[in-house]
Amino acid sequence: MADLSVKYMGLNLKSPLIVGSCGLTNSVKNITDIANRGAGAVVLKSIFEEQIHIEADNLMKSDSAGAKEWDKAYNEILEQMPHAFQEAEQYIANFAKENTLIDYLSFITEVKKAVKIPVIASINCVSHYDWAFFARRIEKAGADAIELNVYSLPSDCRVEGSSYENELFEIVKEVKKFVTIPISLKIGYYFSGLSNTIKKLSESGIQALVLFNKPYNSDIDIDKITITAAPVETEGRDYLNTLRWIAIMSGQVSCNLSASTGVSNVNVAIKQLLAGATTFQVVSALYKQEISVISQILEELSAWMDKHQFKTIDQFRGMLNKKDSEIASTFERVQFMKHFSKIE
Ligand SMILES: Cc1cc2nc3c(=O)[nH]c(=O)nc-3n(C[C@H](O)[C@H](O)[C@H](O)COP(=O)(O)O)c2cc1C
């Protein structure tokens, strides 16, 4: 019987299948089902950096109940970190921000009581300003790790590519001040030097990189002549971009890689592991099929391993990675010339 367990971000996972952050990971009932089906870990629905900012303003205007909660949190943190944070007024503002996020914190605690698998909280952010303190509350609520979904589209042509990249390092630096639990970064692929950025990020003290975030896409309705939202769920070959970059980077990074986007069946999952991913994240497949797709993928993965006589994931993980990035680019160039020159 194949052993599906893996170590991801220093956490012991019973399988490499992680249910990624989405609406389905917003309820204890679903997460219990997800855990019972064999998922190795779950990433909770994200809270937004903006949410933390907005709720701070609300709390500032709020009544005594909110103020009481705020006082409690404020005193707790001051007790823990007496030297690091001298600017009390700033912290008062900061701690105020967590009040209406109390529900998220309670949810983490509730999920932790309900399941044994690692629970990864998620914050969707674009900047390092003024929200990272909340990560400490997430750790205190019991989360095993934090995934930072850094969602920024480098669409402002006045801004240098390096500014967007630097922001990621600033975010990691800020959050690391507040937590001791492992941190992963879920990133997009719009960087001026993607492989260089991935490598440097992997050395920034995080435990994993999730490749990749799926950007929100707009579409156009030509009848109404309006802009519409493209479907959020992935399909068919959407996994190929992730597969390429996992294969190129897995032999070169100093942290784990988790493959995300388009992992809709066991074949794609196996490809991502062969390319060098430590785990793979599944979301759209759960929406399109059912939560039972988790056990199906894991049973089929186990059968494939038995067939190929692999007893552990590590025996084949990364077997087909691209060990040398220079060779990888030459190889791709040659393949491109070979294949496209045949098409007339
Ligand atoms: C309905 C829905 C909600 C999502 N919500 C979040 C979220 O809160 N935070 C996040 O980091 N990603 C979110 N995602 C993105 C997924 O975690 C994942 O990165 C993306 O769907 C690609 O993976 P897939 O191909 O398995 O769907 C969401 C995706 C869907 C479809």
Image: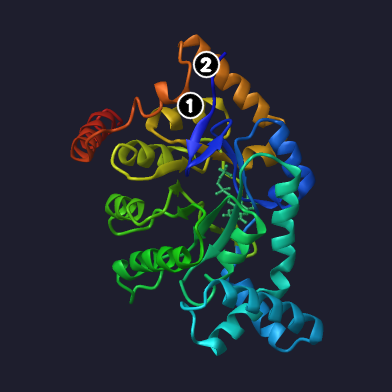
Pointer 1: what residue? 270
The colouring scheme, among rainbow, by chain, secondary structure or one colour, is rainbow
Q: Residue at x 63, y 61 (%)?
A: 140
Which residue is the site of mark 2? 304
Quadrant where the image shows the N terminus: top right
Instruction: Left or right? Give the position of 243 relative to 180.
Output: left
Looking at the picture, tell me which residue is in the foreground, 230 or 108: 108
Residue density around tag 2, few if under 14, some if 14–19, many if 20 or more, within 10 Å: some
Q: CA distance from mark 1 to mark 2?
A: 9 Å
In this rendered view, identify the residue nearer to me: 150 or 204: 204
Q: How many callouts does the rendering have?
A: 2
Disc 1 residue type?
A: Ile
Residue 211 % position (x, y): 44, 47
Q: Is residue 268 left or right of residue 315?
A: right
Mark 1: give few (<14), some (14-19) or many (20+) Cα within 10 Å: many
Q: Earlier in the sequence, mark 1 or mark 2?
A: 1
Q: Residue at x 69, y 69 (%)?
A: 101
